[in-house]
Image: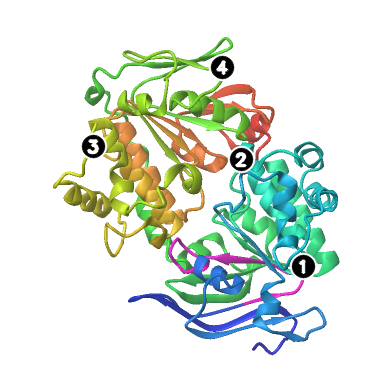
Amino acid sequence: MTEDSNYAVTVRGLTKSYGATSVLKGVNFSVRRGEIHALLGGNGAGKSTLIRIITGSASQDGGTIEFRDRADRLRTEAEGRRKVAVVHQELALLPNLTVAENIALPHFSRGFGLFNRKWAIKQAHAALSMIDRSFADASLHWFVGSLSLHEGQMVEIARALASGAELILLDEPTANLTALETERLFSVLRRLTQETGLSVVFVSHRMKEIRQIANTCSIIRDGRTVIDREPMAGLSDTAIIEKMGQLSQAQAQVQERPAADISRAEGHGRLTIRENGLEISLEPGVILGVAGAPAGPQTLIDTLVGAARSKRWTVSHAGWPARFSSPHQAATLGSGFITGDRSHKGVLHSLPIIDNVLASRRIVRGSLFTGARESVECLDLMQALKVKAASIWDLPNTLSGGTQQKLLLARWLGVPSRLLVLEEPTRGVDIGTKKEIYQLIRQMAASGTMIVWWSTENTELLEVCDRVLAFNTDGRCAGVIERQDLTEDKLAELTGMAA
């Protein structure tokens, strides 16, 4: 226990192993009341395991956890965990229930009783209005399954706020929010911490956001605490990245983007994308960035991967129809897709690692059965991407989020593709893994693959793209910015997003 007892939670000497793998090796972590505390560390450092133990979804092997109420009285662990809410990186909403029902659900999770719909709607509206009043007015009766990812994220944050929690753990909560939505969320968190003493743990890989919202940070590396409660103001970004063990890895990956080797892409030809008079052409080897909130980029992405329901966009490319009839047709004709929404669109959670890695190859090849060479092929791809797993037959949920993202990259590594569409491919991954992804995509572009890359991180688009198609917050095309004119200010002006 710390000398200052003004803490919502105090963790000391926490250990946790899964079989022979030691995940936490004596973690110390504490959060004051009324504090917004950044919990930092690379993918696989142990952050998610620590969060699961604090919330009670996993048990520790050793160490202690103490919860205290606002009167500074020690709570039992069961009482303390009832005052903890978590918003995970991968959303945990029920798609067949309405927005109001999802937000109000924690109030009806214990004991018996009738569901009071009128009361639930009132509670849900109050919580969601703290984030976005117009969305709250419109959406309470919508089914969650019809929401976009960023709308679902707002609903889950509202559910945490509505639960009466005194400690909220936010795991990458802003990954798909616009700048305005993010600032609204931050304003809500600042007000709640100041007025009610709410404690917030903020997990993110976006340093700009971390500095905007958090005053104190702790850093976990390889299952150990390397920085325990230090002020953000006293740490540079470089120092933080170094403590996370990411500095040398990131530096090794930083280099100028190689020029595209067009000679290796013979027969691929130009791709032209059209929408209401707008025409954009891509040459082999070009990386086209897509900027803006999901409304606009998603319709373009759906067209390019064969999932479009609208006829807003058309494509023109040798051997391709104006619109793909299905994702299967898109994949077999050479349009690949990598998403950052691992939970809903990417990872096949019930299938082993080998099936996840080789999924695209089997579609392109028309394979029905696992071949004898596939184990070797899978291991080669995992080695190339530095994916560490006990076995290729393990399930993906044994891996960290960043490592799961590498599985999605492996699907298209070496697969002949004319076009590769990336939908927030670095969502929720650490800086070292990001740089690895940047390098891999640059290599694919250099071999002649056309790349379309949507990101809500403007700094990412500046680093990797040749030109950027920007959408405003209404989902309309706001302009195309060429490389020489590409700046954060220009992207923020056109998109309304400053991430």
In the image, what residue type sits under mark 4? Arg
For marks 3 and 2 on the same chain, the one whose residue lies earlier in the sequence: 2
**Which structural element holds mark 1?**
loop
Label ID, residue 368: 3
Q: Residue at x 30, y 27 (%)?
A: 448
For marks 2 and 4 on the same chain, the one whose residue lies earlier in the sequence: 2
The quadrant in which residue 487 appears is top right
Label 2 environment density (alpha carbons within 10 Å; few <14, some 14–19, many ≥20): some
Question: Which residue is identified by label 4?
Answer: 312
**Which structural element holds mark 3?**
loop
Do the numbered discs 1 and 2 sit on residues whose CB atoms are within 8 Å? no
Label 4 environment density (alpha carbons within 10 Å; few <14, some 14–19, many ≥20): few
In the image, what residue type sits under mark 3? Leu
Task: Look at discs 4 and 3 and give the one toward the viewer.
Answer: 3
**Which structural element holds mark 2?**
helix
Q: CA distance from mark 3 to mark 2?
A: 31 Å
Report the span colored magenta: 30-47
Q: Is residue 17 left or right of residue 197?
A: left
Task: Look at discs 1 and 2 and give the one toward the viewer.
Answer: 2
Do the numbered discs 4 and 3 sit on residues whose CB atoms are within 8 Å? no
Q: CA distance from mark 4 to mark 3?
A: 35 Å
